[in-house]
Image (cartoon, rainbow, N blue to C red):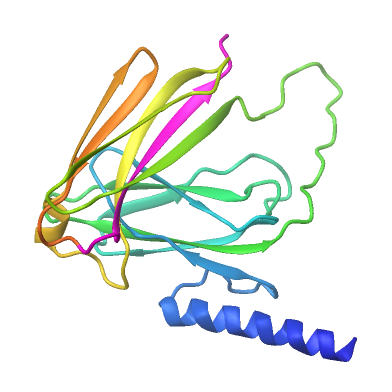
Amino acid sequence: MRRAALLAGAVCASLLAAGAAAGATSECKGLQVCVPIAGPWVLATPERTEFQLDCPKRFIVGGLDAELSSRAIEIGFVGGLGSPVNPGITTTGSAVFLGRFVGTRGVPTFRPHIGCVPASGGGRRTPTAYRTFKPGNPTTRVVKELVVLPNLTLHLSARCPSGLRLVGATHAIGFYGDKPPTVGVAQSVHVTQTVHKGVVRVSARGGTGLLEGRTIVQLDLVCAVPA
């Protein structure tokens, strides 16, 4: 038992060290067992940019943080309602970050971070004494990613599962690396998005400055049950 405890402690220490090495972020601060996950540098636009970051299986989001290349980025995330506000109620196994650029110039990016903790089930809500609807999950997300390659146009399509209708679709451009992309690299990626009869399609083309396999486009569909 003592050996197992020491081994578990060593694993946790190595995970925390990895998170510290990734940058001065605090997604695992105060969490005894935590797996830090860092996303790519995501381009922020004047419209709201959405990017989903996932925990490993059987883990849920216990902490969030982000690095910004500009102070003019408004950052937040999609969370559920409930009391207390904690993992399993406010968060699930994924976190959808919301970034919006409120500045006037530059090529701003944000890098999302999540700290993942072992899933132990969410809390229960106390029933109310009157008939009403509690906040639930009327929508589900379909997320797909396309790797962007230099000087090559690639395509990706997605649609909602059978029985669900499309209520929204966005895409985000992400650059993996320890530092934000240069202006030239960021501006070299061109993406178009179209919607036709419930099918969302994106086409992406990268410039010569891209590092192969390090740039992605994430397509995010929001689906709902027909009213």
Q: Which part of the image, by quadrant, shows the C terminus?
A: top right
Closest to the observer: 33 or 87? 33
Give above or below for 94 relative to 161. below
Identify whether 57 is placed above or below 140: below
Q: Which residues are magenta?
A: 211-227
Percent position (x, y) of residue 111?
A: 36, 61
Q: Is residue 223 magenta?
A: yes
- What x and y, as percent, mark residue 88? 71, 49
Where's residue 2, x and y in %?
A: 87, 90
Q: Quadrant of residue 39?
A: bottom left
212 left or right of 7 in image: left
Nearer to us in this view, 106 or 104: 106
The extreme right residue here reads 1
Compared to residue 222, the image places residue 184 above or below, namely below
Residue at horizontal 27%, vertical 71%? 179
Q: Residue at x 50, y 24 (%)?
A: 223
For this view, does 202 lie left or right of residue 124?
A: left
Position above or below: 37 against 199: below
Q: Which residue is found at the position 26% from the left and 57% from the top?
A: 109
The quarter of the rendered structure image containing the N terminus is: bottom right
Residue drawn at (54%, 23%) of the image: 161
Q: Position of residue 176 (x, y in %)?
A: 32, 63
| 160 horizontally vs 156: left or right | right
Which residue occupies the extreme top position in the image? 227
Residue nearest the viewer, comparing 125 with 150 = 150
Q: Is residue 186 magenta?
A: no
Q: How many marks?
A: 0
